[in-house]
Image (spheres, rainbow, N blue to C red):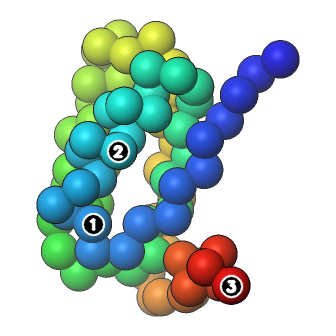
Amino acid sequence: MKKIIIIPAYNEEETIREVITRSLTHADVSVTNDASTDRTASILAEIKQECIKNKYSNKLNIITHQRPTHIPLALQD
């Protein structure tokens, strides 16, 4: 059975690399970038390139919203 880890992100430049790279050791990862205004998007792009170069055995999918959807807030309820 295939495992997928889903991670919402909003302005997570301080933590996103560690969270994603650790998650990629266990399963495929899907990140929803909720209109971050910091370096989150560029860090995700760097990790995606590492995945393309086969640094990780699992896949990374990135969904980027141009306007906030407030998905991370909804997941906290």
Left or right: 49 with respect to 2? left
Q: Mark 3 or mark 2: name the one nearer the start of the chain.
A: 2
User: Of helix, strand and loop, which one carries label 1?
Assistant: loop
Write down the residue under mark 3.
77
Nearest to viewer (mark 1 / mark 3): 3
x and y percentages locating residue 33 in the rendered image: 43, 66
For label 1, count other residues whose C-alpha is less than 10 Å away and answer few (under 14), some (14-19) or many (20+).
Answer: some
| Distance CA(mark 3)–CA(mark 2) | 21 Å
Name the foreground residue: 50 vs 23: 23
- In the image, what residue type sits under mark 2? Val
Q: Mark 2 or mark 1: name the one nearer the start of the chain.
A: 1
Q: Which image quarter: residue 72?
A: bottom right
1 and 3 marks in contact (CB < 8 Å): no
User: Of helix, strand and loop, which one carries label 3?
Assistant: loop
Write down the residue under mark 1.
12
Q: Which image quarter: residue 56?
A: top left
The structure residue drawn at horizontal position 44% and vertical position 27%, both measured from the top left corner, is: 24
Left or right: 53 with respect to 73? left
| Distance CA(mark 1)–CA(mark 3) | 20 Å
User: Of helix, strand and loop, which one carries label 2?
Assistant: helix
2 and 1 marks in contact (CB < 8 Å): yes
Asked if 43 appears above or below 57 in the picture, the reply is below
For label 3, count other residues whose C-alpha is less than 10 Å away and answer few (under 14), some (14-19) or many (20+).
Answer: few
- In the image, what residue type sits under mark 3? Asp
Write down the residue under mark 2.
19
Q: Can residue 5 be spotted in the picture?
A: yes
